[in-house]
Image (spheres, helix red, strand yellow):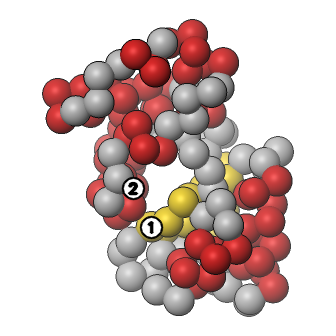
């Protein structure tokens, strides 16, 4: 199990605390320092069953600067969105847990963290 975190994020810290409390075996990836490649983002999106715009933090300054709210959301725009996430990792929703069964969850709640632990 791996968790993508930003240590400054309270939701990330809560998720890590819950994983620790449950005795989970996991690896921390500080994705702002160890930036995921476009291929890694595609793989996580496949595991999540989501599209890149579904995990984009559109209220971030970088998103506003890029004009992401105006970008089309469809198959033809998917690679552009993924490139934006790889180029501006702060835009990636957090935390993301990749579960042992090959799935992943955006773990912003205790319930989502527990869901990942049960997979």
Residue 117, placed above or below residue 85: below
Residue 97, placed above or below residue 82: below
Circles 1 and 2 in contact, beta carbons < 8 Å: yes
Residue 27 image point, x, y percent: 63, 69
Residue 5 image point, x, y percent: 67, 53
Q: Earlier in the sequence, mark 1 or mark 2?
A: 2
Task: For label 1, count other residues whose C-alpha is less than 10 Å away and answer few (under 14), some (14-19) or many (20+).
Answer: many
Residue 111 image point, x, y percent: 64, 77
Residue depicted at x 36% and y 74%: 102
Determine whether, in the image, residue 62 is placed left or right of residue 98. right
- Tell me the SS state at disc 1: strand
Residue depicted at x 74% and y 89%: 22
* Image quarter hosting the N terminus: bottom right
Q: Which mark is residue 66?
A: none
Q: Is residue 29 visible?
A: no
Q: How many marks?
A: 2
Q: Which mark is residue 104?
A: 1
Q: Is residue 80 visible?
A: yes
Residue depicted at x 75% and y 57%: 11
Q: Residue furthest left?
A: 76
Which residue is the site of mark 2?
A: 44
Q: Marks 1 and 2, Cα distance to the nearest angstrom?
A: 7 Å
Determine whether, in the image, residue 61 is placed left or right of residue 42. right
Task: For label 2, count other residues whose C-alpha is less than 10 Å away and answer few (under 14), some (14-19) or many (20+).
Answer: many
């Amino acid at each position: 199990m791996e968790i993508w975190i930003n240590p400054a994020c309270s939701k990330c810290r809560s998720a890590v605390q819950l994983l620790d409390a449950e005795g989970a075996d996991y690896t921390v990836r500080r994705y702002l320092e160890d930036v995921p490649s476009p291929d890694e983002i595609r793989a996580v999106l496949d595991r999540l069953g989501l599209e890149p715009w579904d995990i984009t933090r559109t209220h971030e300054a970088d998103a506003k600067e890029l004009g992401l709210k105006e970008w089309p959301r469809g198959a033809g725009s998917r690679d552009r969105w993924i490139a934006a996430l790889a180029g501006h990792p702060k835009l990636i929703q957090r935390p993301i847990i990749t579960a042992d069964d090959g799935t992943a969850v955006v773990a912003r709640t205790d319930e989502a963290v527990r869901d990942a632990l049960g997979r």
